[in-house]
Image (cartoon, rainbow, N blue to C red):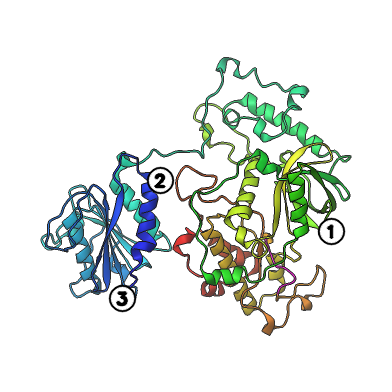
Amino acid sequence: MDSGFDVKYIEPTIQLINNEFLTDEAPSLRCEIDSINLGYGMARIVSDDCPRIPPTIGDSTASSNKCRLIVLFIDPAIEIDWHIFEPMGKKTSLPPDNIARHFFDCLISECNRVGSPYGMLTDERRMSILYFPPDGPPDPYRLLDLDYNYFIRNLSVADSPLRRTIAACVLFSVGTGSLKPVRRFDLCRGALRDPACLNHSFSTEPEILQSFRSYRDFDLYTLQRSPAAWHQFVCWRTWAQRQAANPQTRIKRGSVLRVQCNGFLRNYRPWRSPFPNPRPPQETLDIVARYPRPRDAAIDEAIAQAFQRNNHLTFEIIDVKRAGPDYFSQVFFGKLEGTDTAICVKLFDERLFPCSQQPEYGEGVEPELQLFDLNFADDMMRREEGVYCDRLQYLQGSMIPHCYGFHMLTLPDGWEVLGFFMEIIDGPSLWEVGQQNRSPDFQASVVTSVRHMVRALGFAGVDQRDWHLDQILCPRNSPVTVPPHGDDDDACVQSHSAIPSHLPMVLIDFAFAPQKLGEDWSRPGYPIHNPLVLTLTLYDEIRVPYDIIDDHWLPMMEEEY
């Protein structure tokens, strides 16, 4: 049996609750362990003001009302039919000879002995949660109809991770009186100016509009509540879009941009988690970092020297990859002054951002729930910077491109925008490769590689909410031969025997990838959305059969949630 259950699941959870959830006046939590050596172990989560409970099960009375949760962890080698535990609110009937009966009775007996309102039975794959109503836990040896004394819920760890479930039980047990108030930074809060003059203070005169240079010059709280403020913003966007569309100054091949090196970090604060992110298992690292690519030291040196001397560099455009209205980012290839290697620049020009939402005003409208699709360039840069320079920095040059800094760039029309440089990945998207080869071995390789890539994201706390197969690139210098666009399909891949078990992939585009405890400080553990939506994408876009997906898509680990 895994003797490190408490170290793996309970201690990190207690540490997080003590540090982030409990008020300074509330007693801290601690864990007490009993080693039974009968195929299971038992852990009690208690408050520090609780006397240490004697490790005697069943016949002692130690009801201190300070025990928050009892966890009975079973040896995974013991096979239990978890379906015998009925869903919450229904009667549970376990025959005396059922293998689960002994564990179940021990858990209820211990909850009764120490007065714990919650109990958990788990083998690290599934769990059953017991909740005892305020009247108190039952004594299973005296009360036969247990349905009146507790409720039970049967869960899979894949649906409800152990740490999260342990934390939920403990927090409910502790009660709101001992918890810090919830901070809701995700909703914009503030106060409007004097309503009497509010509708007369948003001028649309040209000289006023032309003084605004970004979305941050407008107050989101006011935009959500004032029609006049929204009208001013719309008038500014119309004017700014005309400036960006001017054919005389539009970015094209040969255009030169002025680069204020590291200008983003000079003007904006990045998002960082106060907790280190765990590295994924070695099996995943061996796959996602299997084919490293060299970094260009000359580019790093040119940027570092310009930054130290407070000088600007120039960047000459050699190819336009994506440009025009209704894009959140404009993408170009070019060369930095004093270097020979072409790199990619991704610009966030808010004048060209799509914005389709029209807010409503009046009675019955919840203004704080409006304009959620009004994306700000600095927020999108923070997400990209958080991935490249913090969460997945160690995977630059393998699973993600090399990044060469986050800067402020001046466009030919004099407009300043945020942008960053990164390595050019020479290769088609996974969507293109998937259209060319649909052999079972190749599709199994795709599923395996994508799964480990998703695992690396989960361990880093990165929640990619914008999945599409064009953001996964397959480098040409990989074991799979991918010809340039237009080559004969027969040359698209090597022979069947040459298909690798793990297809090298590079992931790009993190502007819409929220990160745990990064941008959202309202609660520890920003929820990571279930990446199984990507398996649907694999089926829909490149026709990977579900039987191949089921065979090669590994179950999620606790750290991915």
User: Which-is-in-front pick, marks 1 and 3?
Assistant: 1
Q: How far across and how far down the image is residue 303, in percent?
A: 75, 50
Q: What residue range appears in magenta?
A: 472-478
Q: Quadrant of residue 534?
A: bottom right
For the N terminus, give its image quadrant: bottom left
> Horizontally, is 209 left or right of 220 in the view?
right
Q: Quadrant for residue 537, please give it.
A: bottom right
N-terminal of the pair, mark 3 or mark 2, is: 2
State the CA–CA distance, disc 3 to disc 2. 36 Å
Asked whether residue 553 is in view, the answer is: no
Residue 68 drawn above or below residue 191: below
Task: Determine the residue positioned at 52% across, 49% down.
Answer: 273
In the picture of the structure, the residue carrying the numbered disc 3 is 78
Instruction: Indicate the secondary structure of the residue bearing disc 2.
Output: helix
Q: Is residue 57 magenta?
A: no
Amino acid under disc 3: Ile
Where does the image place residue 25, in percent across and percent down from the top left?
31, 39
Q: Give yes or no for residue 474 being in the magenta stretch.
A: yes
Q: Residues within 10 Å of mark 1 (few under 14, many from 20)?
A: few
Residue 20: mark:
2
Q: Amino acid at mark 2?
A: Glu
Residue with the mark numbered 1: 340
User: Is residue 115 found left or right of 321 in the rendered image?
Assistant: left
Q: Distance of mark 1 from mark 3, alpha carbons?
A: 63 Å
Q: Nearer the viewer, mark 1 or mark 2?
A: 1
Horizontal and vertical percent position of residue 539: 60, 67
Nearer-N-terminus badge (1/3): 3
Tell me which residue sits at (71%, 64%) in the image.
429
Q: Secondary structure at mark 3?
A: loop
From the viewer's side, name the closer residue of 333 and 204.
333
